[in-house]
Image (tube, rainbow, N blue to C red):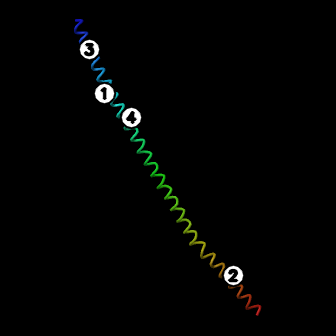
Amino acid sequence: MEAKITNVETTVREMDKRLTAQIQAVQVTMLELDKRLSNRIKELDNRLSFQTNILLWTIGTLIGIVLAVIVLPQVLGYFQEKRARVEFQKRIDE
């Protein structure tokens, strides 16, 4: 009986050692995966930030163009009207 118990204890210890080794191997693999995933997430974050900045600059540029298209005719019309008034005043004065 004692021999069987010793045999079982030896078997359990061997299984424990193998399981411990396998668990450590899995932990190492998980740490490597975690590092790779973290690096990948950082890369994606950087790319997303860059693309967001480009999008914001593009939107700002488009807003500037739209404002220029709206304001430019107004300004040109104002100066044309001012010149016409000056010419009209010159005619009146003559």
Which of the labelled discs sits on residue 22, or is there none? 1
Label 2 environment density (alpha carbons within 10 Å; few <14, some 14–19, many ≥20): few
- Measured Cα–Cα span from mark 1 to mark 4: 14 Å
Specify the amino acid type for callout 1: Gln
- Measured Cα–Cα span from mark 4 to mark 2: 75 Å
Label 3 environment density (alpha carbons within 10 Å; few <14, some 14–19, many ≥20): few
Secondary structure found at label 1: helix
> 78 or 54: which is nearer to us?
54
Q: Which residue is mark 4?
A: 31
> 67 or 40: which is nearer to us?
40
Specify the amino acid type for callout 4: Leu
- Measured Cα–Cα span from mark 3 to mark 1: 18 Å
Q: Tell which residue pokes out farthest to the right in this image.
A: 93
Q: Which residue is mark 2?
A: 82
Question: What is the x, y in percent for residue 85?
Answer: 71, 84
Q: Earlier in the sequence, mark 4 or mark 3?
A: 3
Q: Tell me if 94 is positioned left or right of 10 in this view.
A: right
Q: Tell me if 17 is positioned left or right of 60 in this view.
A: left
Proximity of marks 4 and 3: CB atoms separated by less than 8 Å? no
Question: What is the x, y in percent for residue 30?
Answer: 36, 34
Q: Earlier in the sequence, mark 3 or mark 1?
A: 3
Residue 57, above or below 28: below
Q: Tell me if 1 is positioned left or right of 25 in this view.
A: left
Mark 4 or mark 2, which is nearer to you? 4
Secondary structure found at label 2: helix
Which of the labelled discs sits on residue 10, or is there none? 3
Q: Earlier in the sequence, mark 4 or mark 2?
A: 4
